[in-house]
Image: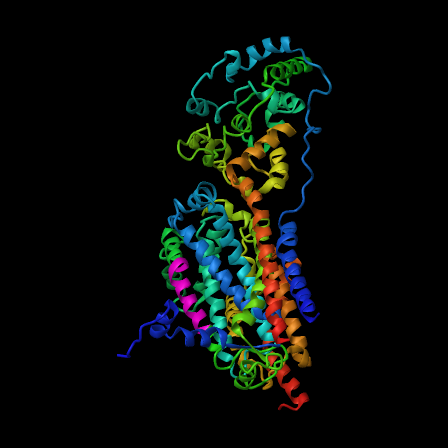
Amino acid sequence: MAKFEKANSVGEWLDQRLNTTTFNKVMMTEYWIPKDINFLWAMGVLLATTFGILIISGIFLMMYYKPDIGLAFDSVNYTIMQEVAFGWLFRHMHGVAASVIFLIIYIHMFTGIYYGSYKQGREMIWISGMLLFMTFSAAGFSGYMLPWGQMSYWAAMVITNLFGGVPVIGDALVVWIRGDFNVADATLTRFFMLHVFLLPVTIMGIIGLHFYTLRIPHVNNQSSEEFDFDEEAEKYLAGNKKESKVIPFWPVFISKDLAVLGIFLIFYFYLVFFHYNFAMDPVNFDPADNMVTPAHIYPEWYFLWSYEVLRGFFFDIAGFKAFDIGLIAFAFANGIFLVLPWLDRDPAILPAHQRPLFFIWFWVLLADLIVLTVYGKLPPTGTNAWVGFFAAVAFIVIFLVLPIVTKIDAKRRGSL
Amino acid sequence: MRELKVLAVVVALTLITYWGVEPFAHSQMHPHVAEADFKFTDVDGLKGTKGDATAGEALVTANCTACHSIKTKGFPEVMDNASSAGAYGVTPPDLGSAGKLYNADYLAAFIKNPAKASDVSHKFTDGRAHPMPGYSWMQAQEIADMVAYLQSIAPKEMTNKEVFVDACQRCHAIKYADMQKGTMAAFTPDENIKDYMGKIPPDLSQYIKSRGHGYLETFINNPQKHLEGTAMPRVGLTEDSQAQVVTYLEEVGDSSKEQREELGPKFLIYMVIFAIFAFLWKNSKWREVH
């Protein structure tokens, strides 16, 4: 065993045993971030904070929530919303944070895409991030079921039904997921387990992985400039803070994050208190009723684009059933972002505005996603159905042309 | 400058998406309906006939109290709720507050032809008849006298809850108003009301949340506007009475509203102060590196 001297302070005592000084340097004061960044680089800290809000508010909600189809609705809408001191505040914070976290995730994702922060060594950052997107989606979906309102029930019905499209085992799979032939009490209880235990634990694990993936390739910067982090770090430590291209995570980077966080929290709490219907759909304040189908069934806004890709194929094509085509397109939409680093055939890391065709590709993709999102909520009739169809086809085409687009950019520049 | 440009793009795209999935989508899913009409101009009403309450008293006593109670005037309920629901399909209302709750023209039209005035004629086909017989055989003056009498005996002030109880609770429960004792169940037993209306009318505990003010205001005034063919009658509430019903739904369904609106600005002020300090700290730190 190592020999321990008498410590003169609590800090020293801990340092002897846990090496806190070194840990602090590695994680905080000498964890280097590029200086050439804008506020979009604060989204990670915003996400971590919002996730923290979800965990804390979720713990308070869990103390009163009852995962039973006979009790769930009233435990949320009566007990928590009206009886428990500030229960309404925790529910509003939880519901709004669950919605807003997806806005930040999308901003974070598209920042990565715009600045090319997913390739040439940064693939694992991208993949772990996409895994977080998927686990957060599962958490959002399972959580939406818990109040056991009309939209909880019917969204669960529609989404679990989709698994019936899996070849051979489809029907059995649906029953296995639901724990019953129908969406029922067993379904609610298991989604409760997923929402409060398995998914949060998995998310925390992947967040750890996501942070770790940044270690070796480092964070990208606004001009995608490559430089030697060790060299720049030495400059900084030698006192040449102004020349150095890096800043330490603590306190310089975090000071900017907190400033952005301040603005974000004003926006967030405004929504929590005064503008929350977008996150807590009025339809879900009708108790679940398996005899009454709501006039319009739609998922939460952050699922609408992929839901519309699914729904866009509303007619059979060449002997293939509309449902099957939609399902394949849906699987494509949910998986394709994962392989983005390999669809981009341009070896250079550059921001989109320095990649002429990719720049167009980027904005077309965003525009298509917004169209899909908006039409994903509208009733799929008449023109709406056709807009949805063409936007869904466009989504697939957009990804199919990405290798070509990026190759042309690279060739014109001379990188290939 | 560049950061502001980036921010402008992010904000613009967020707002476009928000507009698309909220205001625009809802306007497409819930088409706009005409404003509530509290004058009930379309009904076969009093047409300006002035009634005499004294004459009305005799008419009401002779024609109404066989089925309706008027407890304030010494006419008790003829049967308990379950028995009267069994007899009529739905428990008949006490008439003590009718003159205050309902628009006078509507009341006159209702007495003459209940199914027509309440817009539910479609429910009473194939030999089914409205449980209340129409009194269109009476003279216009007699109808006006009865309305005048009902108005004269109605209380001047009623609480929001009293209005709800008299206007809605014969069919609708609102269980969140009394979760412990369960006194806010519908007066008509489930099996009778299901038979009478086609289904059990919804519990209204969360209607202020699920439907919101705008919808409730036009819906209660004329349910057919939003739900064509619905079994719910147009009940003819005056503007004031309806406002009291909606307020009651809010008191029960959104009891934390006052606290929410009181606490919100404080949170925001706190966050503004936090943001100011965060920016000052950021500026002090970044001054060293720029």
* Nearer the observer, B165 or A200: A200
User: Left or right: where does residue A2 sit relative to residue A309?
Assistant: left
Q: Which residue is drawn at the image coordinates 51% and 22% (left, top)?
A: B92
Q: Where is residue B283 in the image (x, y as percent from the top left)?
A: 62, 67
Decide which of A14, B18 is in the foreground and name it: A14
Q: Is residue B72 magenta?
A: no
The answer to whether residue A314 is seen in the rendering is no
What colouring does the structure picture have?
rainbow
Which residue is nearer to you in this view: A204 or A343?
Answer: A204
Residue at left 52%, top 14%? B72
Image mark count: 0
The part of the image, by quadrant, that contains residue B133 is top right
Instruction: Please give the range of residues in magenta.
Output: A194-210
Residue A82 image offset from top left, x and y in percent: 47, 41
The quadrant of the picture occupied by the C terminus of chain A is: bottom right
Residue A206 on the magenta span: yes
Q: Quadrant of residue B178?
A: top left
Which quarter of the figure is the N terminus of chain A placed in? bottom left
The picture places residue B255, in percent across and down from the top left corner, at 51, 39
Would you say residue A221 is visible in this rendering? yes
Residue farthest toward the right in the current orientation of the protein: B48
Main secondary structure of the magenta stretch: helix
- Measured from the top left, where is residue A84 in percent x and y? 44, 43
**As displayed, is residue B201 above or below residue B141?**
below
| Residue ranking furthest to the left | A1
Would you say A256 lies left or right of A78 here? right
